[in-house]
Amino acid sequence: MKLFTAQQIRDWDSYTMQEEPIASIDLMERAATACVDWLQHRFPKQEFYTIFCGKGNNGGDGLAIARLLMARNCSVTVYIPESGQQGSYDFQANLERLNQVYPEVIQFIETPEELPLVATGNIIIDAILGTGINRPATGFTAALFDYINSLSNIVVAIDMPSGLYADKAGDNNPVIEADHTLSFQGYKRALLMADNAGAVGEVHVLPIGLDPDYYNQTNTPFEVIDAALIATIYKPRLRFAHKGNYGHGLVIAGSYGKNGAAVLACRAAVRSGIGLLTCYTQDSGYIVLQTSVPEAMLITDPDPDHITELQLDTTPYRAVGIGPGIGTQPATIKAVYQLLQQYRQPMVIDADALNILAKHPDWYDLIPSGSILTPHPKEFERLFGATTNNFTQQQLALEKAQLLNCIIIVKGHHSFIATPAGKGFYNTTGNAGMATGGSGDVLTGLLTGILAQGYTPEDAAIFGVYLHGLAGDLAAAANSMEAMTAGDIIEYLGQSFQQIGRYGRSI
Ligand SMILES: NC(=O)C1=CN([C@@H]2O[C@H](COP(=O)(O)OP(=O)(O)OC[C@H]3O[C@@H](n4cnc5c(N)ncnc54)[C@H](O)[C@@H]3O)[C@@H](O)[C@H]2O)[C@@H](O)CC1
Ligand SMILES: [K+]
């Protein structure tokens, strides 16, 4: 799903009004109806709502929501912070409509003394500011945000949590901290940033019937990975396949005390659809690996405890994954350098291999084109330097992806994939239960396995990250976020592939 800027969304609204055609006020009614339907579906027994409306179109949505909720037998109070300015055209029109049928619910507030008491059971609707925000909230607006944030009521933000910019960082500006954000038609980038997690809460995208032609004609560098995209990437297994069709991968992982990293990466790789897998690990890992992952072949390093030697014949391998649990011993650093000097196919580079690279920036040129780097934010910082917010971090990832001709996956709740062509993809599968030791090793194994099967590096990264998150979601549904383990992610890869296989048929 393409990610549009606030300006593009405005253009999309206008395009729809002209082409459908639909009047602006009717489009607002459609958006408000979608919100009310969502509210009643999510909170079927909820009766009481407190709605704060600004004087732009976001506030217009709030006024229409108020009228529709009242018509559905809910009890609503609307508070409008009085700025002294004339409201937008559709705000005024909706104020008039509400005033005609339920004048008693409307109240204007102007000073902190007039901030209302909100009963505990009320759901608060934040319709103060949407995508039209063009400056930080100050004065009474900021005080209102503070007040709402101090209450324990559930807060549902319309389109955007008020105060948040859709396409740029806000540098700690005042924002509403919502429990749910109902975003019209698509996501905005700000809704996908870890920095804004506390403001956006759960994001729900509500279709409001904007014209598909605008969507198809309009280019944007950013996309959310969704079922439709995955259906175009996933290559179902050929009926007459043999193992040679699906490549041979090499996972280089482990050290004394970290056999688990190698086991998890290899187990994930053998469940990725790969034809053949070889694991390279330290000598003491022999029995562990051969027993835990009998599907994989094994080469052991001469050293009992660490990987010290990577002068291998790499010609059989279509992809190499390196890093999980290898440590940063001097001999391992030397071995990583040996591999970088000789292997020219795309690699998956993770964990300690990234930490080693970060200490040797002069080796970056040796990273084969099309490699996939999988740093978490701290590793990213070690590799490429500190950034001040997610927007600048993602911009830097895009610049480095282009410079190194690599894919960079900045791991996180919505992992961000930067490609050398300047595109950025946000993942939407996955959950906080995956923030546990070993889930990165699973991703490395999966990516190596997918890359070995001949997917392009960009497709492998998108597909691997999505699949990993989906398996994590199924694991959390079965075992809870708390009790799920990285190994459980691997257990649910099968069901994830089955689900993805159905996308192609249903889209
Ligand atoms: N037809 C449409 O254009 C549709 C728009 N929709 C709603 O319209 C919203 C956008 O509406 P608007 O463009 O009117 O903008 P907003 O309602 O977000 O903001 C209104 C106005 O507030 C002022 N403002 C900006 N920053 C401020 C600040 N920090 N403090 C105080 N005032 C500030 C600006 O003058 C701005 O135009 C969307 O987020 C969505 O909720 C929906 O109704 C769907 C259809
Ligand atoms: K809002």
Image (cartoon, rainbow, N blue to C red):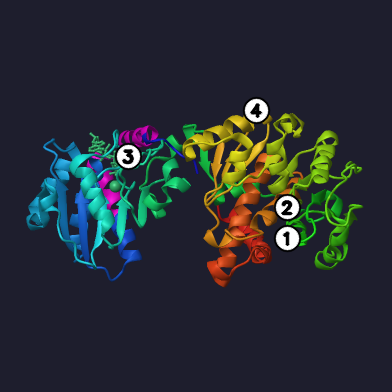
The numbered mark, 4 or 1, whose residue comes first in the sequence reads: 1
- Residue 64: x and y in percent read 21, 51
Q: Mark 2 near mark 1, Cβ–Cβ under 8 Å?
A: yes
Question: Between tags 3 and 4, which lies in front?
Answer: 4
Q: Residue at x 76, y 47 (%)?
A: 321
Residue 324: assigned label: 2
- Residue 387: x and y in percent read 51, 36
The numbered mark, 2 or 3, whose residue comes first in the sequence reads: 3
Q: Is mark 4 within 8 Å of ligand 1?
A: no
Q: Quadrant of residue 435?
A: bottom right
The numbered mark, 3 or 1, whose residue comes first in the sequence reads: 3
Residue 406 falls inside the magenta stretch: no
Magenta region: which residues? 7-33
Element assignment for label 4:
helix
Give the residue pinned by disc 4.
403
Give the residue pinned by disc 3.
131
Q: Is residue 156 left or right of residue 457?
A: left
- Residue 301: x and y in percent read 89, 52
Classify mark 2: residues with Cα within 10 Å, few (<14), some (14-19) or many (20+).
Answer: many
Secondary structure, magenta segment, majority class: helix
